[in-house]
Image (spheres, helix red, strand yellow):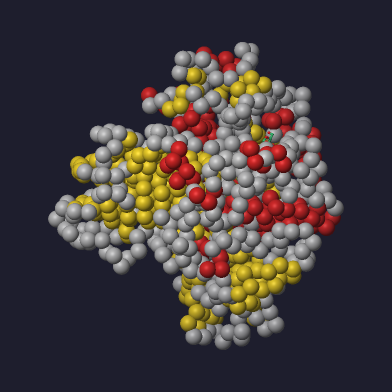
Amino acid sequence: MLTSEEIHPDNASNEAASEGSGAALRRLHRYDAVHEITRIETGRENGFLLRGARAGLAIVAAADGIVRLKLAQGKGAEPDLRTTPAIVREGIGESVRIGESVRSRESAASEEPAYTEDDGSWELHLAKLRVVVHKPSGRIEIYRGGSPSGSGDSAAQDSGPQAEAPPLLVLSAIEWTGKRRTTATIEGGEGSHYYGLGEKTGFLDKQGESFDMWNSDVYEPHVPDIDALYQSIPFLIHYRCGAPAAGLFLDDPGRTTFDMRSGGDRAILASENGNLDLYIVDGPDLKDVVKRYAALTGRPPMPPRWAIGFQQSRYSYMNQEELLTVARTMREKRIPCDVLYLDIHYMEEYKVFTWDTERFPDPRGMIAELAEMGFKVVPIVDPGVKKDPRYSVYAEGIRNGHFCTKLEGELFVGDVWPGPSAFTDYTDEAAARWWGDLHRFYIDDGIHGIWNDMNEPSVFGVPSKTMDVDVVHRNEGNPKTHGEWHNLYGMLMSKATYEGMARHLRGDRPFVLTRAGYAGIQRYAAVWTGDNRSYWEHMAMSIPMVLNLGLSGVAFAGPDIGGFSHHATGELLARWTQLGSLFPFCRNHSAIDTIHQEPWRFGERVEAICRDYLSLRYKLMPYLYSLFYEATATGLPIVRPLLLEYPEDRQVSNLCDQFLLGKDVLAAPVLRPGTPARSVYLPEGAWYDYWTGARHEGGRSILAETPLETMPIYVRAGAIIPEQSLALHANERPEGPLKLTVYSGGSGSFRLFEDDGRTFGYEQGAYRLREFVWAESGSERTLSAALLNDGHIGSGQPLELIVEGLERRPDSILLSGSGETADWTYDASLKRLSIALAIDGEFRLTVG
Ligand code: GLC
């Protein structure tokens, strides 16, 4: 425990925070900058090289709407334009992809680079952007829109900067001290908001904050002072209401800093490796920035449907009988659940790829019995391989040189759960493949999902808490020190795991969960936000954390519901389960020595609340599953800050005690104990209370009653929400028709995605995508269904169509396109129209 002595005057640094670290650094160190640019070199693939007095700066097109700035310090130096494993570069737009297939689709920008020059500046046209570089100062302004003529003829045009259009982004300086610390200063301007940065503490808007990117195992409480957690996603979004949004991806897997504090409205991005590899991502809308960034670093694959279900974990379920009892209790109590976790106690002496056969005498039998009940088992796999010559994994890894070493060849050994351990070098293809193939051990027992933990990597008992920075990763002949590539360690472990599982699961989609990651982690794993606590504050913080992860490409994320360490209470668990039931990743997990927090541990009332909200998740499965498809196809997040859908609304720029699931469902969780009512902000338009059907006008805050049983949920007028009847696990066939509720009073559409929920067939088109469109004009309302893709032989499930908020009984219901007729009833008191449709394909229904 720290005491007040920490703030003893003698301990204070001389750097006044108000002065700004930039100025202070300037005094302390030799400073250099990209300036005095004397020459431009063309002939570079996709762009240019600007030669300055002390540096070269490559400005190249990465894709349409994305320019890359890569620094080479020193006169005459050549920038290294190889990319890190974060980059995949898909085309922007809607597509389905997965794993390696994406690499064959690499697409660069479609515009030929061109430039003009005058006395004071160079004006580059590339990637459908215009980059103005001022000669003496090195200041860079980036404008939307490419070459005005589109001729691609260098130096032929003198378009001049279009002064009236505000720049997308202004970089006032690129500087470095003592070669190592390189900074880029972004002139955000007044009213700047900053989002993204993946998994960080604090609120949604990061203006006024400063964060480090250095994957860290943080067991201390996650508070605003903690500026680095398990994940590092160096992607920042700059937004000013009314101006185009821009993204900044600093692709450096070593230590970087994003400082939106010391420069006022500026953002100062720093890299500690003498590296500046900065991608600038065009909007103009926030959604475009997110989509382009996801195309650059990869969109998430479809998870198996079971992985979207509720998951129950504990550090640890200690033996076979305990795990089976949890499973049976879930089913007896009719609490929907798909996944049970095995934490480190399933292993013999914490050796990965082993079973403790005293605790788990018949893993295969147990997993088969659980599968019969509709459960999947996900075991934890940590990177540390116990140093024990009798242990085959260690012996094999040593024999084949798969582990991380120092340059001189000395094995790196660090302490983790199994004691002294070696760590696989996942940058080495043979080692990564070996690791992936080891997972046959689990697959043979019936396992389809793996939980990667401690993969920052976490190392006990050393001040750095991680691998020595002078370990060398072999990286296929382009070696990197651990200091340079630290933040990639966890992602490359999950990549090796995902790809190994995919190789051996005979066409089934694997599920990987990870604690550590870097930009692009979404291609391989879902992310949980690590060791939070059973604090109300941590529940509240999980919302902006998951929302910013979503804005940073990681759609499949969630916290430990109920909190990991400390002790949950019934009220906290009820509220956290309500919130978590609508998060993409939904898992209850708690630590050894804490009070058990399975849904039934706090009496019947809390159990019923957990059951009801988890059941809601399963009823909404068609909606949720389709949102996962949207993330796969476009990179858009599943849960969204209101800001993403209502960027012009100044009320929502930092709103993060509510969130949207997709674009149409708004949840307002209760985040403090003993809260009988809460204020809910409804954006413009009309909104329906999901529970009561009551209609509210938006553009204002309302007060919602919040007895313990209620988390307020609203649905946007015009929305179309598909629901199914309750199932106890995601692969149980729901009975009855698919319910489609249209909330009248606005227009809207929804794309319903269906496939087998299991295989990669959807990549080859084995899925069905139906688009439902609701349109209102005068007294006529139509619902049309179009088949955008018809590659899944579905069950031909009938539809139950509900129209909410219909003021009067319709005169007629006309159905065209199918030859079928429709049975309907109208309930005047509920203002609800119900229509049974025995059709499955395209149709058009007119409510007259
Ligand atoms: C770490 C993980 C936690 C896990 C524990 C034991 O603290 O974050 O989720 O339960 O290790 O494996």
Q: Residue furthest right?
A: 603
Q: Residue furthest left?
A: 156
* Placement of 443 over or under 736, stated as above or below: above
In-front residue for pair 709/111: 111
**Residue under the image location 85 percent in, 53 percent down:** 603
Q: Is residue 594 visible?
A: yes
Q: Position of residue 442 (x, y in %)?
A: 61, 30
Quarter of the view holding residue 77: top left
Q: Is residue 795 left or right of residue 74?
A: right
Q: Position of residue 710 (x, y in %)?
A: 74, 64
Residue at 66% x, 73% y: name it: 702
Q: Residue at x 28, y 51 (%)?
A: 133
Where ligand 1 lies, by quadrant? top right
User: Against 260, is 828 above or below?
Assistant: below
Q: Name the residue nearer the viewer: 322 or 364.
A: 322
Q: Residue at x 65, y 47 (%)?
A: 223
Left or right of 633 in this view: 396 = right
Picture layout, residue 48 above or below residue 398? below
Horizontal and vertical percent position of residue 21: 49, 45
Viewer-side residue, 816 vs 293: 293
